[in-house]
Structure formats: C-alpha cells, structure tokens
C-alpha cells in the first residue's frame, strides 16, 4: 500500500491515503468519472476499431510495466478494475489482492493456465489477462466462458484458443496470439509489447493527436482572456448602470461571454440570465440570483475542467513520449537484421515474444534511427520532461487564480469597476485573472512546442493501417 501511495503514474489510479480498521485495510482512491472499462464495453453499441483497441491496450501495458518494475502484481486483472477518467484516460485500479492469501472473490475467466496447472502466478500471468481483455474489446464477448467453473477451467488450460474475426491487421493478430500463448515463457512482457512496431505506431499517433487537441484548447483558453479583457474595457463596464443591481447582471454576462469559445450554448444562456437580473432584479433577489448563478452554473466547473484536462493530458503525453524514446533506444542496439538473432534485447530467444514479423520492421526502424540519431531523440525526451514538470506549477497557479476570480467577481467588485472605469485595470480581479491566463498560456505553449519537436524527429513505421487509423479519427 505504501508503494502504491508513492507511485505517481498517469495510468495507475492514485491512492491518496489508506487506513486500517480492525482487520480491513481501506484505500482512498482517485475518482474516475468515466466508470470502469467493463461498463464501457457493455454500453458500446458499435465495435471498436484497431487503433482504439490498441490505444487502451498500450495504456494498460504502461500501467502494468510500472507496477511490475516495482515488484508488485495486480492479481485481479479484469475490465472491472480498469477505469476511465472524465477525459478518457485509462487507469489501472482495484489493487485489492495484494495479499496472496486473500479470500477475495475473483473472476477466473481472466486467469492464466499456469494458475490452475502449477498454482503459479507472476507478471506473465497478468499478460494473459491482458490478452483476454484485448479479445473482449474486439468482440464484446469473453475469451473463455462456460456455464460452470468445472467446465471453464479445462477450456482455459487446454481448450482451443479464441481467434479474432474481422478486419484486423496481421501484426494485430500476431500480438493477440503471442499474448495468449499458453507457455508463459513465450509470452511477451509489458515492456516488449510496448516496443513492438504496431504499438509504437499507436503511441506516436496518440501523442500527435493529443498534442493537436491541446493546442486547440490552448488557443481557446487564450480567447477566454481576450474576451474578458474586451468585456472589461468596453461592453460590460459601459453598460453597467444602477450600481450594485446592474453589476449583478454584469458578472454573469462577463462569465458567459468569456467562456464562449468552450461552451457556446451554456455561455449564451448564462449571459441572457445575467442581463435579466441587471434589468429587473431587486437588490436582495439580485445578489441571491448572482450567487446561485455563479456557484451552480457550469462555468466555474468548465474553467476547472479545462485546467484539469490540460494537466492530465500533458502528463500522459510526457509518459507516452518517454516510452517511445525508451523503446527506440532499446531497439537501436540492433545494428542490423542479423543482430536480431545475436545479443540484442530482441534476439532469437525473445523473438516469439516480440513477433516473428517484427524482424523486418525492426531492421527498417534501426536504419531510420541511425539517420535521426537516438541520442537526439533521448535528449529531446529529457527536455520534454523538464519543461512539462515546470508547467505543472503553472497549471496549479492558474487553478487558484480561477477560484479567486470567481470568488471576487461579486457585485461589489463590478460596482468598483463601474466607478473607476478602464483605469481600474491594475486593481481589477478580472484583469488579474486575464494576466494569469496569458502567463499560463505562454508556459503551456513552450511545452507543446517541445512536444512537437520531439514527435517531428521520431521516425515512424507507416503501414497500410495508418490510413485506416486516420480515417477512423
């Protein structure tokens, strides 16, 4: 439990605290608003595409790699223990069976054959569970099922392996087959899965797509500052009449207009409400309505969500780019296709884990890496980590500034602005927030620029699936 509490990983559910009561340990977990992966599979009305499946599988493998490197085993790898945040990021949770003598009820459909044959359970057993989850993502049905446990166990230990039907690439079929290999020694590790060309392509694609999304969000965030300043200097201040009562309508108008780039419908509604309060509300009713509108509207939550989304996605992209860099660095030890069968980390003994088709792709990738220079990629990856770490503080400061803005934006503040006019900029909480947004925007742009530099120098192995992934997105 202490190890998990000290673990900070984008794809592992954070455990903020823990305590013991009588004979039971309790964990205070991060709340994942997106529900469990099991719920998402059940609720899907359409089938997932290859890129979507791979996207989730690589996030699961990154989480497993992190806990396996700490000497931990999950021991209950099922879709029910994998969660999604409100922004769609996958997190591994449900660490309830850390005690090997635990009597917790387990879902045996996901257990590996060696658990029943040899009563052994290790990191390779959890890779088998990943294979079962992969199959379920592709088909929305269990990889192994039966009416009773007595009938189910023989299917897992010696029955025919499930096969995938449909438009899945040969590399995808091979990955699935290798993961569900009944010989645990021949199964790939989480690290080896992440170093396959098919998963590297997925990680690169995920990174680039998320960076583009973050750039769009950053542009919208800057528009919030521009809108606030425009309203402050022109429309709202000029139209505030009647002192406090007019200001009450002004605050909702300001908030609604400022957030228009993010929530057009909601913002326009809030703006209309604000104007109504300004014209017809009495002092008592006006103040009450103003407080309710600001506290209960979606605007404050929107600002918090924007900032939280930035932080979550930046941390995830940093991890993805680090993983790509680490995998490429390992692959770069292969100086030629022949070395795949010699002393490299992807030699003959590991080829079954890495994929038989991977040899040609790895050879091509090694040639690209010699041109680009793995040192250049590693150096840029290190720089990305440093720059992103600094941005975390900027986002925290912006979160505080947003809270101050919403608390301070009351009738008294707006009335003071109306009295002083545009010269009140330096003292206005509106303009303080505008300044905070713009400062944060500059720092976040530096992070995105470093992301873009790294993704531009990372070589990719494009294949016929690339166009399909682009079309899907």
Image (spheres, rainbow, N blue to C red):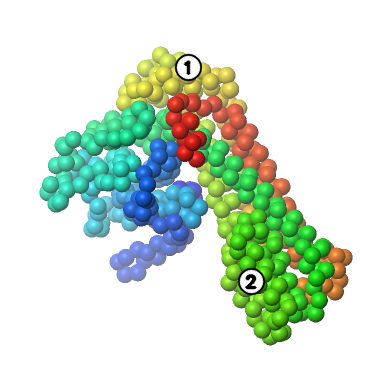
Q: Nearer the viewer, mark 2 or mark 1?
A: 2
Asked if residue 1 lies left or right of residue 153, the reply is right
Residue lying at the far left in this picture: please name it. Answer: 150
From the image, tell me which residue sits under label 1.
335
Quadrant of the rendered structure where residue 94 is?
bottom left
From the image, tell me which residue sits under label 2.
294
Evaluate whether residue 345 shows in this view.
yes
Of residues 389 and 83, the one drawn nearer to the viewer in this rendering:
83
At horizontal 65% and vertical 81% (from top left) the residue drawn is: 288
Instruction: Report the Cα–Cα distance between label 2 and label 1.
Output: 62 Å
Picture quarter with the N terminus: bottom left
Give how far across and how far down residue 105 sits, in percent: 24, 57
Label 2: how many Cα within 10 Å (few below 14, some 14–19, many 20+): some
SS at badge 1: loop
Asked if residue 228 lies left or right of residue 36, the reply is right
At horizontal 64% and vertical 78% (from top left) the residue drawn is: 289
Evaluate whether residue 413 shows in this view.
no
Give how far across and how far down residue 69 sits, in percent: 41, 41
Of residues 208 and 359, the one drawn nearer to the viewer in this rendering:
208
Does 264 appear above or below 314?
below
């Amino acid at each position: 439990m202490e190890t998990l509490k000290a673990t900070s990983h984008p794809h592992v559910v954070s455990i903020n605290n823990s305590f013991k009561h009588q004979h039971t340990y309790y964990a205070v977990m991060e709340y994942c608003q997106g529900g469990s992966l099991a719920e998402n599979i059940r609720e899907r009305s359409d089938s997932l595409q290859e890129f979507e499946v791979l996207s989730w599988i690589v996030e699961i493998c990154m989480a497993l790699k992190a806990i396996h490197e700490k000497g931990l085993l999950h021991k209950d790898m099922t879709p029910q223990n994998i969660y999604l945040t409100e922004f769609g990021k996958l997190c591994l949770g449900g660490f309830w069976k850390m005690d090997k003598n635990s009597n917790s009820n387990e879902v045996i459909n996901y257990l590996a054959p060696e658990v029943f044959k040899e009563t052994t359970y290790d990191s390779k057993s959890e890779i088998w569970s990943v294979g079962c989850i992969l199959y379920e993502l592709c088909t929305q049905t269990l990889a192994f099922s039966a009416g009773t446990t007595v009938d189910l166990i023989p299917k897992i230990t010696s029955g025919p392996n499930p096969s995938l039907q449909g438009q899945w690439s040969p590399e995808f079929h091979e990955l699935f087959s290798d993961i569900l290999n009944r010989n645990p020694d021949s199964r790939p590790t989480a690290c080896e899965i992440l170093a396959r060309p098919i998963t590297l392509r997925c990680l690169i694609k995920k990174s680039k797509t998320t960076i583009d999304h973050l750039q769009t969000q950053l542009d919208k965030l800057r528009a919030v500052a521009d809108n606030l300043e425009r309203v402050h200097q022109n429309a709202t201040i000029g139209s505030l009449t009647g002192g406090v009562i007019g200001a009450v309508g002004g605050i909702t108008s300001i908030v609604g207009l400022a957030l228009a780039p993010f929530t057009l419908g909601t913002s326009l509604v809030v703006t209309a409400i604000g104007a109504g309060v300004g014209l017809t509300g009495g002092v008592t009713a006006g103040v009450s309505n103003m407080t309710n509108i600001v506290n209960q509207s979606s605007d404050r939550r929107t600002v918090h969500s924007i900032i939280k989304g930035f932080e979550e996605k930046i941390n995830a992209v940093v991890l993805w780019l680090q993983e790509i860099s680490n995998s490429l660095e390992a692959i770069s030890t292969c100086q030629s296709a022949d070395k795949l069968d010699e002393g490299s980390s992807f030699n003959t003994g590991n080829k079954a884990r890495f994929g038989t088709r991977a040899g040609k792709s790895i050879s091509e990738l090694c040639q690209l890496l010699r041109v680009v220079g793995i040192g250049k990629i590693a150096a840029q990856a290190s720089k990305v980590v440093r720059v992103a770490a600094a941005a975390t503080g900027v986002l925290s400061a912006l979160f505080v500034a947003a809270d101050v803005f919403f608390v301070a934006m009351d009738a008294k503040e707006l009335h003071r602005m109306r009295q002083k006019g545009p010269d009140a900029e330096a003292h206005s909480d509106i303009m303080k927030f505008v300044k905070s947004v713009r400062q944060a925007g500059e720092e976040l742009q530096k992070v995105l620029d470093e992301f873009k530099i790294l993704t531009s120098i990372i070589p990719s192995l494009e294949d016929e699936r690339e166009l399909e992934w682009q079309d899907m997105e």
